Image (tube, rainbow, N blue to C red):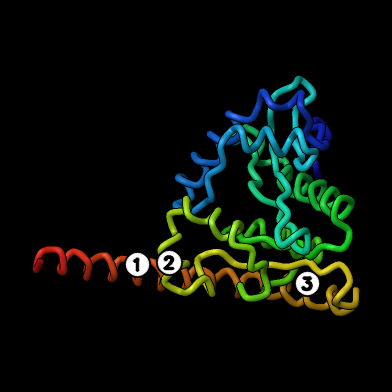
């Protein structure tokens, strides 16, 4: 059960003081997991807070506990809930799930007609997404907005993404559709995904191993070429 000692709400100007702490933790978390993450600057996070496009979690004593923000792409046709991060001190309270719920509600309020999508390497985030009505899709179902894909350039897995012509990578794409899919059908898809989550996790691990081996092989070939030249 979620511990009620946290306050989760839309972020504002008064929360800009936490921006650097948030971006530092995003980077540390990505390094610890050995996975890619698009880097964001403290100024970028502050902008999201000022625009009312972020959710922050604080303890009742005022300590930062978690964060997530909203990005709109393709003239608002697509929305992403990005940068979900929880402070290491508060990762055993179900906080990530509650933050995702709040940022999802905020997204639906601000962009009621938009499709909401996400890219993630984490099984825990995929499970939370499925509870909200997301289901796995191919990359071709996501936004074609060049600015979105530019955001992947700071990710360590960007070479893999480009080698696949942006059709695949280590991340799994998930999508929530507000109106184009009947609620019953969307619920069915989400339910089927949850039932097969463990299988899906194994497939992700296989894909990760394949892509990383591909990347290593490509680097080895490049080294040989450099020596020959």
Query: Residue 64, percent across and down?
Result: 68, 28
Which label belongs to residue 78?
A: none
Residue at the left extreme of this rendering: 228
Measure the C-alpha gap from mark 3 to mark 1. 32 Å
Which label belongs to residue 190?
A: 3
Crowd rating for badge 3 (residues with CA inside 10 Å; few <14, some 14–19, many 20+): many
Residue at 67% in and 41% down: 92
User: Mark 1 or mark 3, which is nearer the start of the sequence?
Assistant: 3
Which label belongs to residue 215?
A: 1
User: Mark 3 or mark 2, which is nearer the start of the sequence?
Assistant: 2
Query: Residue 209, percent across and down?
Result: 41, 69
What is the quadrant of residue 224 in the picture?
bottom left
Q: Nearer the viewer, residue 18 or 94?
A: 18
User: Secondary structure beneath disc 2?
Assistant: helix
Q: Nearer the viewer, residue 128 or 23?
A: 23
Which label belongs to residue 160?
A: 2
Crowd rating for badge 2 (residues with CA inside 10 Å; few <14, some 14–19, many 20+): some
Residue at 81% in and 53% down: 104
Measure the C-alpha gap from mark 2 to mark 3. 28 Å
Q: Is residue 46 left or right of residue 158?
A: right
Q: Is residue 144 above or below residue 79?
A: below
User: Secondary structure beneath disc 3?
Assistant: helix
Q: Is residue 197 left or right of residue 217?
A: right
Measure the C-alpha gap from mark 2 to mark 1. 7 Å
């Amino acid at each position: 059960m979620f511990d009620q000692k946290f306050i989760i709400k839309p972020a504002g100007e008064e929360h800009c003081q936490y921006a650097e702490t948030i971006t530092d933790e995003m980077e540390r978390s990505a390094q610890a997991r050995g996975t890619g993450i698009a880097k964001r600057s403290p100024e970028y996070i502050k902008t999201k807070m000022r625009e009312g496009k972020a959710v922050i979690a604080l303890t009742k004593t005022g300590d930062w506990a978690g964060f997530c923000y909203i990005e709109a792409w393709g003239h608002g046709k697509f929305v992403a809930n990005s940068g979900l991060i929880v402070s290491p001190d508060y990762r055993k309270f179900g906080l990530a799930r509650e933050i995702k719920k709040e940022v999802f509600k905020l997204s639906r309020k601000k962009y009621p007609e938009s499709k909401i999508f996400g890219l993630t390497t984490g099984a825990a985030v995929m499970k939370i997404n499925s509870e909200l009505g997301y289901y796995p899709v191919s990359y071709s179902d996501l936004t074609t907005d060049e600015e979105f894909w530019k955001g992947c350039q700071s990710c360590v897995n960007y070479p893999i993404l480009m080698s696949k012509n942006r059709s695949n990578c280590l991340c799994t794409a998930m999508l929530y559709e507000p109106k184009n899919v009947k609620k019953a059908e969307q619920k069915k898809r989400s339910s089927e995904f949850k039932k097969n989550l463990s299988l899906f996790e194994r497939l992700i691990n296989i894909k990760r191993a394949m892509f990383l081996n591909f990347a290593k092989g490509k680097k080895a070939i490049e080294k040989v070429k450099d020596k020959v030249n």
